[in-house]
């Protein structure tokens, strides 16, 4: 854990820098900056370009380890719930993926640069407002196909065992990144990584308090792990629209709690 702490300390020292300086001076380390889950599989999986597919909207149920899992029937709905009980269809791919005009922590034109159009427009507004506040946000990972999630999960199982892998990475179909409505956000002050320390940076604090104004929620809040099924992820934002995001923010709900009210 030494690296993030050092990165954060340097970050504190440098927060007086202008936004432009921060981005330019950070450019050299961008190449080395890859989120943890990506690092695990770099040598195993090559990300492929997006191929257009027709979304499947059939409702289906499958039996898995004694529990009924309900495949979601509304994958194109901006309020779609995806979690360990509600996976997306294996072949679901959004039909309106675009690359938002925001800075990213990598240079390549990869699928993870893409999100659905509605989320892309909201991200552009969110990032523009952050920039006005002299904050440096970067996109780290957006859309992720079922097949890529499968590769990430398999690599994590091989490295950590299935129980640990389930805590830190989604089972294929259960990742919100497959909706095209989620983006992992980072900054140079956490070494362009996706780590819990992001919550303590100026960027992480601002994101938590302002994301709802642009239709985003912190999808996996602290202390709600038993409801969301995932560890705290201050970097993972999910587009749900301004109305839902505001209710969720003001009441301290998880998305699951919001939908059950
Ligand atoms: Zn994420």
Image (cartoon, rainbow, N blue to C red):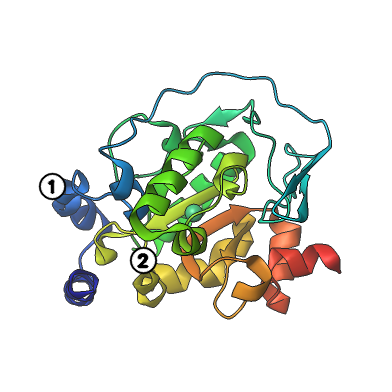
Q: Position of residue 44 (x, y in %)?
A: 30, 36
Image vertical order of residue 52 relative to residue 214, above or below: above
For mark 1, give the secondary structure: helix
Which quadrant: the C terminus? bottom right
N-terminal label among 1 and 2: 1
Instruction: Answer with left or right where residue 55 lies relative to residue 119.
Output: right
Q: Nearer the viewer, residue 104 or 121?
A: 104
Image vertical order of residue 186 relative to residue 247, above or below: above
| Image-quadrant location for residue 103 | top left
Badge 1, how many Cα within 10 Å: few under 14, some, many 20+? few
Q: Which residue is mark 1?
A: 28
Task: Using the rendered image of the protein, determine whether residue 123 is visible from the camera's viewpoint.
Answer: yes
Determine if the C-beta at disc 2 is less than 8 A from ligand 1: no
For mark 2, give the secondary structure: loop
| Image-quadrant location for residue 1 | bottom left
Q: Position of residue 34 (x, y in %)?
A: 28, 49
Q: In the drawing, what numbered circle is on residue 20?
A: none
Q: Position of residue 150 (x, y in %)?
A: 49, 40
Image vertical order of residue 177 relative to residue 98, above or below: below
Q: In the drawing, what numbered circle is on residue 195?
A: 2
| Image-quadrant location for residue 220 | bottom right
Q: Residue at x 52, y 59 (%)?
A: 166
Instruction: Answer with left or right where residue 261 lies relative to residue 248.
Output: right
Mark 1 vs mark 2: in front: 2
Mark 1–mark 2 Cα distance, whole angstroms, equals 20 Å
Task: Using the rendered image of the protein, determine whether residue 139 is visible from the camera's viewpoint.
Answer: no
Determine if the C-beta at disc 1 is less than 8 A from ligand 1: no
Q: Position of residue 242 (x, y in %)?
A: 70, 57
Q: Nearer the viewer, residue 88 or 166?
A: 166
Q: Residue at x 47, y 33 (%)?
A: 99
Badge 2, how many Cα within 10 Å: few under 14, some, many 20+? some
Q: Residue at x 37, y 60 (%)?
A: 160
């Amino acid at each position: 854990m030494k690296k993030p702490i050092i990165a954060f300390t340097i970050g504190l020292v440098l927060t007086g820098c202008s936004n432009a300086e921060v981005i330019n001076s950070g450019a050299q380390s961008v190449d080395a900056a890859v989120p943890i889950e990506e690092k695990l599989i770099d040598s195993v999986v090559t990300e492929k370009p997006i191929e257009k597919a027709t979304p499947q909207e059939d409702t289906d149920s499958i039996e898995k380890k004694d529990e009924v899992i309900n495949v979601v029937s509304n994958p194109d709905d901006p309020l779609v719930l995806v979690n360990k009980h509600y996976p997306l269809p294996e072949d679901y791919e959004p039909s309106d993926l675009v690359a938002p005009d925001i800075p990213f922590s990598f240079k390549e034109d990869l699928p993870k640069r893409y999100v659905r159009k509605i989320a892309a427009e909201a991200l552009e507004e969110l990032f523009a407002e952050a920039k006005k506040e002299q904050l440096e946000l970067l996109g780290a990972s957006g859309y992720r196909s079922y097949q890529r999630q499968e590769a990430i999960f398999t690599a994590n199982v091989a490295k950590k065992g299935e129980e640990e892998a389930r805590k830190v990475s989604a089972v294929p179909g259960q990742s919100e990144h497959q909706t095209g409505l989620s983006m992992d956000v980072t900054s140079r002050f956490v070494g362009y990584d996706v780590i819990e320390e992001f919550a303590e940076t100026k960027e992480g604090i601002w994101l938590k308090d302002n994301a709802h104004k642009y239709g985003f929620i912190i999808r996996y809040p602290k202390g709600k792990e038993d409801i969301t099924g995932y560890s705290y992820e201050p970097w993972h934002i999910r587009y749900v629209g301004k109305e839902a995001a505001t209710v969720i923010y003001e009441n301290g709900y998880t998305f699951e709690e919001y939908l059950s009210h």
